[in-house]
């Protein structure tokens, strides 16, 4: 398992709230720490009660570790602890309690579509890395509007939505801007990507994400799935347009030196190793 570090970043995203500093040896809840004083923060956008957010706990008591109506409050990593009616982050302390920018108490479920192709030269031959001598993979990456970091075009699983649907929907929204396409254009986009997304894909990760928005009581989890265009003839030819929470979209070389949002680099490492590609 990963020891979260981005979930302990000093300044909480989208605010000037500072987390209570948590040293490495105090991350684990089992380390006794009476002086621990996390800062309480739930973003105004969450307190405004949008459809995607839970109410504050008090009058509202969600059923944790269960499928609670259509909201899945189960963790991919097994049962998590609940203390004083609040779920505890299974990866330990973050220096902040409440929900921050996250809508759900406990796990907030996302899905990450990793669409890849081989990097090719102008003659169409695969390009190998000069150091590793392995072929280089490329993946469709977006620059997130919220933080300016490059990321996989992932997004939240809607209540009751199948993960396979989320993967295709978020990819279409963020990398193809399907939200602003006409019904006709949308249909064409669907046709182009349906073949790639009709394969089961290669699941490279399922579980907790070291996301900068995580708190002691709310955290991101994901299912990351790789859809690979081996001949480079399907999705490789699609015109990319950033949409929704994406400011830019581009093919990007898969390489360990590339800094990415949250634990996305960790997912790409698994893709590269599985496909015997450069990392
Ligand atoms: C990350 O946040 C996940 O891995 C996923 O990429 C993303 C989902 O959140 P939004 O893009 O909807 O903000 O933890
Ligand atoms: Mg989205
Ligand atoms: Mg997103």
Image (cartoon, rainbow, N blue to C red):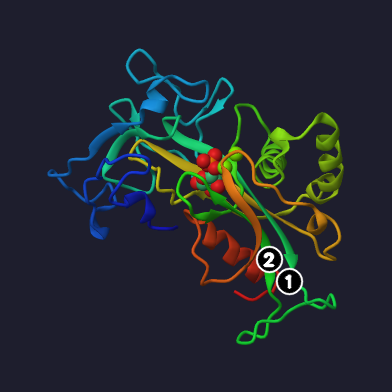
Disc 1 is placed on an element classified as loop
Confirm or reject: label 1 Cβ below 8 Å from ligand 1: no
Classify residue 186 by image quadrant. top right
Q: Residue at x 82, y 57 (%)?
A: 237
What quarter of the picture does the C terminus occupy? bottom right
Residue at numbered disc 2: 138
Q: Position of residue 138 (x, y in %)?
A: 68, 66
**In the image: residue 151, left or right of residue 19:** right
Give the numbered dot on residue 119. 1
Q: Please indicate, yes or no, whether residue 83 appears anywhere in the rendered image.
A: yes
Q: Please indicate, yes or no, whether residue 76 appears anywhere in the rendered image.
A: no
Q: Residue at x 35, y 20 (%)?
A: 57
Classify residue 131 by image quadrant. bottom right
Closer to the camera in the image, 99 or 66? 99
Confirm or reject: label 2 Cβ below 8 Å from ligand 1: no
What quarter of the picture does the N terminus occupy? bottom left
């Amino acid at each position: 398992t990963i020891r979260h570090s981005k979930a302990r970043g000093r300044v909480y995203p989208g605010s000037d709230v500072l987390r209570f500093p948590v040293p490495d040896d105090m991350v684990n809840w089992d380390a006794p720490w009476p002086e621990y004083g996390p800062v309480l923060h739930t973003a105004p956008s969450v307190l405004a009660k949008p459809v995607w957010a839970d109410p504050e706990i008090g009058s509202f008591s969600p059923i944790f570790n269960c499928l609670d109506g259509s909201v899945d409050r189960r963790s991919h990593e097994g049962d998590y602890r609940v203390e004083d009616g609040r779920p505890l982050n299974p990866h330990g302390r973050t220096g902040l309690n409440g929900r921050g920018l996250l809508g759900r108490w406990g796990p907030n479920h996302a899905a990450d579509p990793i669409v890849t192709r081989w990097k090719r030269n102008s003659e169409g031959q695969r390009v190998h890395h000069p150091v590793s001598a392995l072929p280089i993979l490329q993946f469709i990456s977006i620059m997130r509007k919220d933080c300016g970091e490059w990321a996989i075009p992932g997004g939240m699983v809607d209540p009751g939505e199948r993960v396979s649907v989320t993967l295709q929907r978020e990819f279409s929204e963020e990398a193809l801007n399907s939200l602003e396409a006409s019904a006709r254009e949308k249909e064409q986009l669907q046709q182009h990507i349906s073949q790639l997304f009709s394969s089961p894909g290669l699941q490279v990760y399922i579980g907790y994400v070291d996301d900068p928005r995580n708190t002691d009581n709310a955290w991101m989890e994901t299912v990351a799935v790789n859809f690979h265009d081996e001949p480079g003839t399907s999705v490789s030819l699609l015109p990319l347009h950033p949409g929704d929470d994406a400011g830019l979209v581009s093919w990007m070389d898969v390489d360990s030196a590339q800094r990415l949002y949250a634990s996305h680099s960790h997912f790409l490492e698994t893709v590269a190793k599985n496909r015997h590609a450069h990392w």
